[in-house]
Amino acid sequence: MRKVIFLLSIVMFFFKTPATANYEKKFYDFSIESITGEKINLKDYKNNVILVVNTASYCGFTKQYDELQELWDLYKDKGLIVLGVPSNSFNQEKNNNKDVKEFCEMNFNINFPLTTITEVKGKNSHELFKWAKENHGKSAEPKWNFHKILINKDGKVEDTFASFTKPLSKKLIRAIENIL
C-alpha cells in the first residue's frame, strides 16, 4: 500500500501543472463576441458568478444544454451567468453562428448568452481561455466539449469541471451555491 501511495505521489508531482495565478487581468477585463455579432463586455457580468461552458452541436454531451438551461433558470436571479461558448475546437460544431443559434433555440430553448463560434484550445484559442489556463493551470483548458470553468465574483477561476460533470450535478451545484 505504501508503494502505491508513493507512486501516486510521484505521478501527481510530475503531472501537476504550476499555475502562476498572478491575475494581472480578471475575467471582467475581457470581451467576446455574441452569437449574433455584438460585443459582450464581460465587465457587465461583474459581481456575478459565471459558468463558462464550451459547447458543440454534434457531441455526445450536447444533451447537457437542457441542464445548462435549467441551471440558468434556477440561478440567474441569484447572480449566476451561464455563458455558452460554441466551439469547433473538437470538430463537432456547425459551420456558422446562425445555424448554432437556431439549433440551440429550436432543440433546447436556450436563452442564456451564447458567443460566436470560438476556439477554446491551443495557440488560436480566445484570450479568455488562454488567461484561464495561465492562471488556473491545465485543468482550465477544455479537454473536450462541455468543459466547465466556474468564475467567482472576484473575476478569478474558482474551479473547473470535466465534460462528464453534468450541469445539475451535486458537485457543480454545491460549488456554485458556495460562491453565489
Image (cartoon, helix red, strand yellow):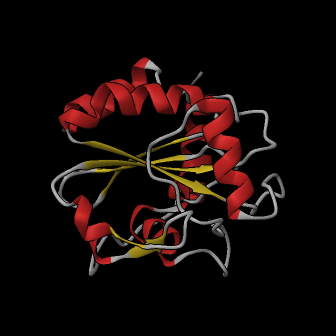
Q: Which residue is at the front of the view, 10 or 115?
A: 115
In the image, is residue 43 above or below residue 14? below
Task: Please say whether residue 3 is visible from this viewpoint.
Answer: no
User: Residue visible at 51% across and 68% down?
Assistant: 129
User: Residue visible at 82% across and 52% down?
Assistant: 92
In the image, is residue 55 above or below residue 95? above
Quarter of the rendering containing residue 29: bottom left
Q: How many marks?
A: 0
- Give the position of the N terminus as an image quadrant: top right
Indicate the position of residue 38 as horizontal and vertical percent values. 46, 73
Q: Which residue is at the front of the view, 139 or 76?
A: 76
Indicate the position of residue 180 as horizontal and vertical percent values. 19, 37
User: Residue visible at 54% across and 72% down?
Assistant: 37
Q: Is residue 45 left or right of residue 113?
A: left
Task: Please say whether residue 158 is visible from this viewpoint.
Answer: yes
Q: Is residue 51 left or right of residue 36?
A: left
Indicate the position of residue 47 as horizontal and vertical percent values. 15, 54
In the image, is residue 175 above or below residue 12? above
Indicate the position of residue 23 as horizontal and vertical percent values. 28, 74
